[in-house]
Image (cartoon, rainbow, N blue to C red):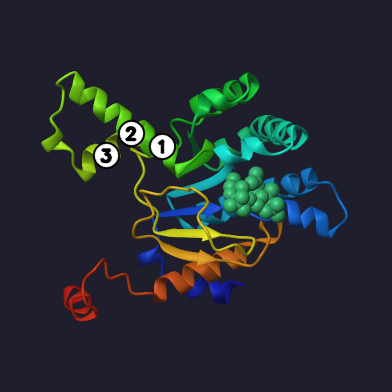
Amino acid sequence: MNERLNTIDTSRLPQHIAVIMDGNGRWAKQRGLDRTFGHKEGANTVRRILRECGRLGIPYLTLYAFSTENWNRPKAEVDALMSLLVSALHDELPQLMENQVRLNVIGNLEDLPLPCRQGLDDAIRQTSANTRITLTLALSYSGRSELKNCMKKIAEKIENQELSSKEISDEIILQNLYTHALPDPDILIRTGGEQRVSNFLLWQIAYAELFFSPILWPDFSEEHLRDIIIQYQSRERRFGKTSEQINASKQ
Ligand code: IPE
Ligand code: IPE
Ligand code: MG
């Protein structure tokens, strides 16, 4: 385990890891259990992966916990997910404080039931001065609705003559996204074997390195994460340039 950790170059860590946590339902089904058990086990994986990111010194972790499309699931599953969120926020708060985790949330938060919003507000307030790692939960989130919302905000500013259309830049767009305070993800991981982005961070993942893992989220371990970081560090991120240009800029 330590040997593997040694192969991560701590001077070139990703700053932001985003994860599509998929496979909870299948994990439960494989065991003849209700899907809810998979979500409960998935919450344990969140705790482990968050702790590992903190330990490695990764400053931003963003987790896709519930999509806007997930509201279309059976009511019993949606209700179970919402109560799991409320109890996890309550139970984990001391750990978040101890590990210096600052909680952040993105999505259409007004869609969430009141106890969830209250639990989130409370945890966000209490953790706001923590500095080790920012954990962002994407809840009732969809990339397209984030972009729609961003376009509406910019259009309103133009209508109010606070902005002209010529001034629209990457920076202005970023300022009007839910993720205005976050750097773009360096790594996007999807567990559970599917190779799609399911409406997650569509603007922000423009140059993220993508990793699709067959492991179901409840089984995703610290070692799987470290393996991905090692692979990430062996990839050449060219951002449109040539390999020669990248190598020349390193010298
Ligand atoms: C991801 O696991 C968690 C949520 C979407 C809330 P799933 O519940 O989608 O698990 P599978 O894909 O059915 O296995
Ligand atoms: C994506 O998983 C959303 C979350 C992980 C919260 P889904 O299981 O909802 O995605 P699809 O339906 O397979 O694309
Ligand atoms: Mg799924």
Amino acid of disc 1: Glu
* Residue designated by label 1: 146
- Of residues 184 and 193, the one nearer the viewer is 193
Residue 113, label in figure = none
Q: Is residue 37 above or below residue 96?
A: below
Residue 164 x/y as whole percent: 12, 30
Residue 145 x/y as whole percent: 44, 36
Mark 3 close to ligand 2, CB under 8 Å: no
Side (left or right) of 151 relative to 90: left
Amino acid of disc 2: Cys
Q: Residue furthest bottom?
A: 244
Q: Is residue 55 above or below residue 227?
A: above
Under tag 1, what secondary structure? helix
* Residue designated by label 3: 173
Visible residue check, residue 6:
yes
Visible residue check, residue 67:
no
Identify which residue is drawn at 62% across, 40% down: 70
Side (left or right) of 113 relative to 204: right
Identify which residue is drawn at 39% across, 60% down: 208
Identify which residue is drawn at 22% across, 37% down: 172
* Residue designated by label 2: 150
Specify the quadrant that holds the C terminus: bottom left
Side (left or right) of 173 relative to 184: left
Crowdedness of circle 1 by 10 Å Cα count: few (<14), some, many (20+)? many
- Of residues 6 and 110, the one nearer the viewer is 110
